Image (cartoon, grey):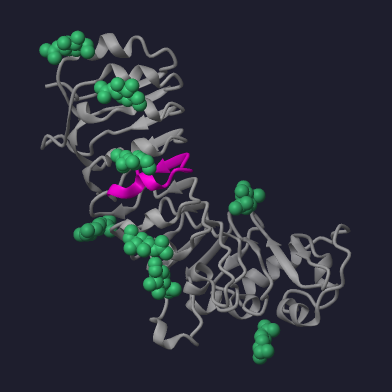
Amino acid sequence: MSLGFLLIFLFSSILSTTNIHACNQADHISLQAFSSLVDCCRWNGITCNQEGRVIHLLLPSKRLKGGMFVSSLQNLTHLTDLNLSHNSLHGALETKFFSSLNCLEMLDLSYNLFSGEIPFSIPPKSIRTIDFGNIFRGFGGCSKLQILRAGHNSLSGSLPEDIYNATKLEELALPLNSLNGAISERIANLTHLTFLDLFINNLSGVIPLNFGKLSKLKFMNLDFNSLRGNLPPSLMNCTNLVELHLGSNYLEGDLTKLNFSKISHLSKLDLSIRLSVNPYLKGQVHPEILSLKSLSFLSLSRVWLTNITGAMKILMRCQSLQTLLISSSFD
Ligand SMILES: *[C@@H]1O[C@H](CO)[C@@H](O)[C@H](O)[C@H]1NC(C)=O
Ligand SMILES: *[C@@H]1O[C@H](CO)[C@@H](O)[C@H](O)[C@H]1NC(C)=O
Ligand SMILES: *[C@@H]1O[C@H](CO)[C@@H](O)[C@H](O)[C@H]1NC(C)=O
Ligand SMILES: *[C@@H]1O[C@H](CO)[C@@H](O)[C@H](O)[C@H]1NC(C)=O
Ligand SMILES: *[C@@H]1O[C@H](CO)[C@@H](O)[C@H](O)[C@H]1NC(C)=O
Ligand SMILES: *[C@@H]1O[C@H](CO)[C@@H](O)[C@H](O)[C@H]1NC(C)=O
Ligand SMILES: *[C@@H]1O[C@H](CO)[C@@H](O)[C@H](O)[C@H]1NC(C)=O
Ligand SMILES: *[C@@H]1O[C@H](CO)[C@@H](O)[C@H](O)[C@H]1NC(C)=O
């Protein structure tokens, strides 16, 4: 528990009149470092269930500073929603922090100064060891994580394997960090995913070919990484996609072979290439693109396009198009 975190919490904890259940004693002990004077269920930002257990701890934009708060939160075993976004918390995400928080449904740590790796779980043989992996795989059958946001920090390392076991995940947002390594094929197990944002990291490897199994996906942003490989044709099965950002990577293959007409809700499409030294993605603009009636943003910068006249004729008929980026695109 950092003093900075504690003091600022005290100043910002305004009495709330909406929570009527008396705070469970164990939870109050956990939080009494903050203030022992008032029933913690009455603090602003805290919600308790009928047993007086703290279930929501929502403290975004509270100017919280300092390091991790392992000891104070680990006993809040009924916590489902934890939002500490837009503060100045720093340090590594200690594995212990998540030791008992295995009922988390929402975790938002974005816009802080966290660093270090997202902890991996310990191999199954040490099953008694409790770790960050628990919130993904559900120690005790309680894998409920639906929202994980930890963007705009300085997290490094690769995506922990356990993320792919969090099959209830609907939103995974880790943009603007320094994550590296590949995205596993196992991402296709996250069939409830609607929002995937890994914008500006250092992810490498090929784009998993089975992304198309994520049929609920509406938003995907992998812009500004170092991903290679073909644009997976299976993506055309993600018929709910509204935004697809794969720009500033090293996409390969033939644009002509892609038929976008099934992802008809698409509004933003970024297939730009990071460097134009090699012909990565190439081909022609296909008239099928006209079936994207909502397309308002299209970037094909540094894609090696042939037949500029044909492309312009087609694109001029894209009625919703507002932004077209095709710099250095034509041979
Ligand atoms: C958490 O629970 C453990 C075991 O019951 C206890 O030893 C510890 O003091 C508690 N920590 C806090 C901050 O309440
Ligand atoms: C956390 O709080 C911020 C600020 O109120 C809000 O914008 C954000 O959506 C919240 N996160 C989640 C996952 O609800
Ligand atoms: C994750 O799921 C795979 C099966 O897809 C399983 O083999 C593995 O043990 C699980 N990992 C954990 C940490 O539960
Ligand atoms: C997860 O995906 C891998 C590879 O795509 C697959 O072998 C495995 O069976 C899947 N696990 C689950 C639980 O769906
Ligand atoms: C990105 O990852 C590569 C290895 O894939 C590494 O050589 C490079 O230093 C990393 N860049 C940054 C900015 O972390
Ligand atoms: C799209 O989905 C259909 C039905 O699930 C499947 O038969 C087809 O192979 C998929 N297409 C691609 C390119 O993965
Ligand atoms: C693209 O797909 C649509 C249906 O999804 C089909 O009608 C059309 O013929 C396809 N175009 C090409 C060039 O394959
Ligand atoms: C150029 O594109 C137009 C429109 O798609 C097409 O009609 C024409 O055949 C193309 N020309 C060549 C040389 O591919």
Q: Please say whether residue 218 is one of the residues in the magenta stretch.
A: yes
Q: Is residue 53 left or right of residue 237?
A: right
Where residue 53 appears, x then y in whole percent? 77, 73
- For the magenta stretch, what is the residue range? 209-222
Where residue 208 appears, x then y in whole percent? 29, 51
Report the residue at 51% width, 74% height from top: 134
Q: Is residue 50 left or right of residue 171?
A: right
Name the quadrant of the C terminus. Answer: top left
User: Which of these two is toward me, 270 or 293?
Assistant: 293
Name the quadrant of the N terminus. Answer: bottom right
Q: Quadrant of residue 249?
A: top left
Asked if 195 appears above or below 25 in the picture, the reply is above
Where residue 151 appears, x then y in whole percent? 47, 54
Asked if 262 appears above or below 84 in the picture, the reply is above
**How many labels, in total?**
0
User: Which of these two is toward me, 194 or 119?
Assistant: 194
Q: Is residue 278 left or right of residue 29?
A: left
Report the residue at 14% width, 20% height from top: 306
Report the residue at 19% width, 22% height from top: 284
Where residue 165 appears, x then y in whole percent? 44, 65
**Residue 245 appears in the rendering:** no
**Residue 305 appears in the rendering:** yes
Q: Quadrant of ligand 1?
A: bottom right
Q: Please say whether residue 249 is one of the residues in the magenta stretch.
A: no
